[in-house]
Structures are given as C-alpha cells and as structure tokens.
Amino acid sequence: MKKTLLAEFTAREGAEDEVTRLIVDYAKEVREEEGNLAFDVYTKASHPRAFWIFEVYRDEDAFQAHLKAPYGGPFNTALGPLIEEDASVLTFLDPVT
C-alpha cells in the first residue's frame, strides 16, 4: 500500500527565501528516490510562509528508505532554526475507497 503524507511547517519571518532554497534542493534529491512517487511543495496562498509538502511513496519500505537517505539529516538540521515549529508536522493520509 502507498505511504502518503503531508508535511507542514512555517518559515520564520525573513527566512522564507532560505527555506525555499533548502526545500527546492531537497525536493530534487527526494524525487530521485526509487520509491518516491510524488514530492510536491506548496506555500499557502493566504500565508506564503506556510509550506506544505505532499509526499507519496510506493510503500512503507520506500518510506523507510527515504527516512534513511543521507541528505535527510542535513536538510532537517539546516531547516530547524529557520522554522517556527520544532520540526515538520507530519500528517499521514489514508485513501478513501
């Protein structure tokens, strides 16, 4: 079964450009992962510092491989001081059938 989630975080005031640069570079890496089916980055139209990332992985194994990717830790370390939350807020999604 596919693993689908929404990751959300808010850039600190004045950090929007740096957060955008980081997430765009990170997205390029993630999209190359064998098990990644989607990694779409958005900002909220009414609040451009609010970032939403829609992620889909082939299955749980592909998601676990994503978590172990060598570029994930450095990305999260760099992102941490630039966002208002302690970390990205993850919401796991199930399809409605």
Image (cartoon, rainbow, N blue to C red):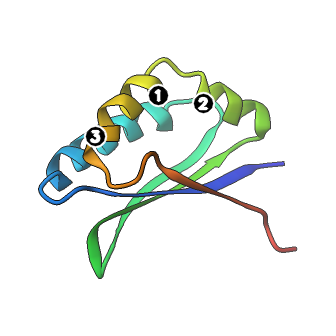
Do the CB atoms of the residues marked 2 and 1 lie less than 8 Å apart? yes
Disc 2 and disc 1: Cα gap in Å? 8 Å
Please say if 91 is above or below 82: below
Judging by the rendered image, the residue that carries numbered circle 2 is 66
In the image, taking residue 42 as reference, residue 39 lies left or right, namely: right
Please say if 5 is above or below 70: below
- The residue lying toward the viewer, choosing from 21 and 16, is 16
Q: Which residue is painted at 26% across and 45% down in the image?
A: 82
Packing grade of label 3 (10 A; few <14, some 14-19, many >=20) is some
Q: Which mark is residue 9?
A: none
Q: Which residue is painted at 42% across and 31% down in the image?
A: 29
Judging by the rendered image, the residue that carries numbered circle 3 is 81
In the image, taking residue 67 as reference, residue 31 lies left or right, namely: left
Amino acid under disc 2: His
Q: Which residue is painted at 29% across and 82% down in the image?
A: 46
Packing grade of label 2 (10 A; few <14, some 14-19, many >=20) is some
| Outermost residue to the right | 97
- The quadrant in which residue 59 appears is top right
Residue at disc 3, secondary structure: helix
Residue at disc 2, secondary structure: helix
Q: Position of residue 14 (x, y in %)?
A: 12, 56
Q: Position of residue 51 (x, y in %)?
A: 37, 61
Mark 3 or 2, nearer chain start: 2
Judging by the rendered image, the residue that carries numbered circle 1 is 72
